[in-house]
Amino acid sequence: MNHKIPQAVLLAASNEAFNEVTYIGNLDGQEVYGFAEVDESGFPVPLGLPTLGLWDGKRVEIVSGEEGLQLLGHFE
């Protein structure tokens, strides 16, 4: 599935020093995106607990750490 990532989500990820954004799914009316960092060879850089961007169509909320991990549990 090819999902167009909103520019506001890409900007939020960049502002948090992430260079990779992946659409995860929809939860409670918000689109959930995973933020990551990949190196110049395209390999993921290990970062620990997840950082997510929640997009409600107007603004991006950044969720990370234990809260991000708990949120990801809704998609298993």
Image (spheres, grey):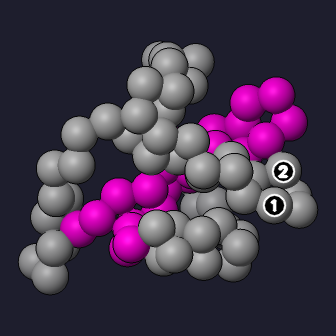
Q: Report the number of numbered marks.
A: 2
Q: Residues within 10 Å of mark 2 (few under 14, many from 20)?
A: some
Residue depicted at x 72% and y 58%: 60
Q: Residue at x 14, y 64 (%)?
A: 43
CB atoms at circles 1 and 2 under 8 Å apart? yes
Instruction: Mark yes or no: residue 10 visible.
Output: no
- Which percent across, then down, holds residue 46? 16, 50
Instruction: Residue 22 in the image: state x and y as whole percent.
Output: 48, 56
Magenta stretch: dominant SS? strand
Q: Is residue 75 left or right of residue 41?
A: right
Residue type pointed to by label 1: Arg
The relative height of residue 6 versus residue 33 in the rendered view (above or below) is below
Q: Can the viewer see residue 40? A: yes
Disc 1 is placed on an element classified as: loop
Q: From the viewer's perspective, tell me whether residue 11 is left or right of residue 70.
A: right
Taking depth in this image into account, of 45 and 26 the one nearest to the observer is: 45
Q: Residue at x 16, y 58 (%)?
A: 45
Could you give the CA–CA distance between mark 1 and mark 2, rounded to whole angstroms?
6 Å
- Residue 59, which numbered label? 1
**Segment colored magenta:** 17-38
Residue 56's label in the rendered image is 2
Relative to the observer, which residue lies in front, 3 or 52?
52
**Horizontal and vertical percent position of residue 28:** 82, 28
Depth check: give the residue in front, 75 or 59.
59
Task: Choose mark 1 or mark 2, whichever is in front.
Answer: 1
User: Where, by quadrant of the figure, is residue 32 drawn?
Assistant: top right
**In the rendering, which numbered label is found on residue 39?**
none
Q: Position of residue 53 (x, y in %)?
A: 60, 51
Of residue 13 and residue 5, the one placed in the foreground of this image is: 13
Is 57 located above or below residue 75 in the figure?
Answer: below
